[in-house]
Image: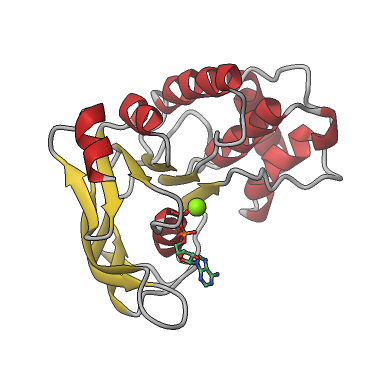
Amino acid sequence: MTTATTAAAGLRLTLERVTLGYGRGGVLRDVDLEIEPGEILTVVGSSGSGKSTLLRGLAGLLPPYRGRILADGAEVTGPSPDRAMIFQEDGLLPWRTVLRNVELPLAIRKVPRDERRRAAREWIARVGLAGSEDRLPRELSGGMRQRVQLARALAAAPRAVLMDEPFGALDAQTRAEMQRLLLDVLRDTSATVVFVTHDVDEALLLGHRIAVITSDGVRILAEATRERIVKEL
Ligand code: ADP
Ligand code: MG
């Protein structure tokens, strides 16, 4: 059963000679990439380089023209609750309270009410929002809404979390708080994380490994330093 405390093992995500894009031509061409179970892979690239496109492919929202995208060896053919997504714009349902937003993915999975309440409350507390369960999204700051998104994603015990510049719209101080919080809560899960950012320092801070998207494609940097990444971009 999915509870906040029994984390399922992280997914291995594999791209085999994948070409992804929209209509004419590929945004990303012939990408080979292996994302290890439980790792935090940060993907850094300039605006328009294809970061969101890569995540949409991994999420199963954009089928590749060529090649295969695999999760634990099985071809990804569509979205799955195993792979949670977190966006920059929060995607919370405005008419649902914090508690009912966090519960939603569990409700969709038909987790019994008491159990999903417990998991939701536990994760709301873990992201520092205890006491805000009954508030509506519009009553929260941008940072608090991102905390709710994080709780909602992790309460459902996903095996991978795909994050698309989730802290990009936050002020510097709130962003630093969220980065610390993310590292903190991820310690209690074994989910594989793909975290996309255009911020080199964020990529270095959060990633176990760092992939860079350039006009040549997607490449893991063996020894990532600020200077190396900036030179690649
Ligand atoms: P990033 O997230 O790195 O800023 P994207 O993956 O969003 O970049 O976009 C990569 C390229 O694909 C850009 O040139 C963008 O204009 C194009 N693109 C993105 N989404 C679409 C779409 N829905 N239809 C057509 N082209 C798109
Ligand atoms: Mg993007």
Number of callouts: 0
37 sits left or right of 51 in the view:
left
Residue at 26% from the left image edge and 31% from the top image edge: 208
Q: Is residue 188 left or right of residue 87?
A: left
> Residue at left 43%, top 56%?
55
The answer to whether 128 is drawn above or below residue 140 in the figure is: above
Front residue of 169/81: it is 169
| Residue nearer the viewer, 219 or 159 | 219
Q: Which picture quadrant has residue 43?
A: top left
The residue at the point 29 percent across, 64 percent down is 70
The residue furthest bottom is 24
Q: Is residue 187 visible?
A: yes
Q: Is residue 177 above or below residue 221?
A: above
**Residue 12, position in %: x, y?**
27, 51
Most extreme residue toward the left is 222
Looking at the image, is 188 positioned above or below residue 156?
Answer: above
Instruction: Name the spot of residue 75 as percent of width and height, x first.
Output: 32, 70
- Horizontal side of 94 relative to 230 (left or right) equals right
170 sits to left or right of 133: left
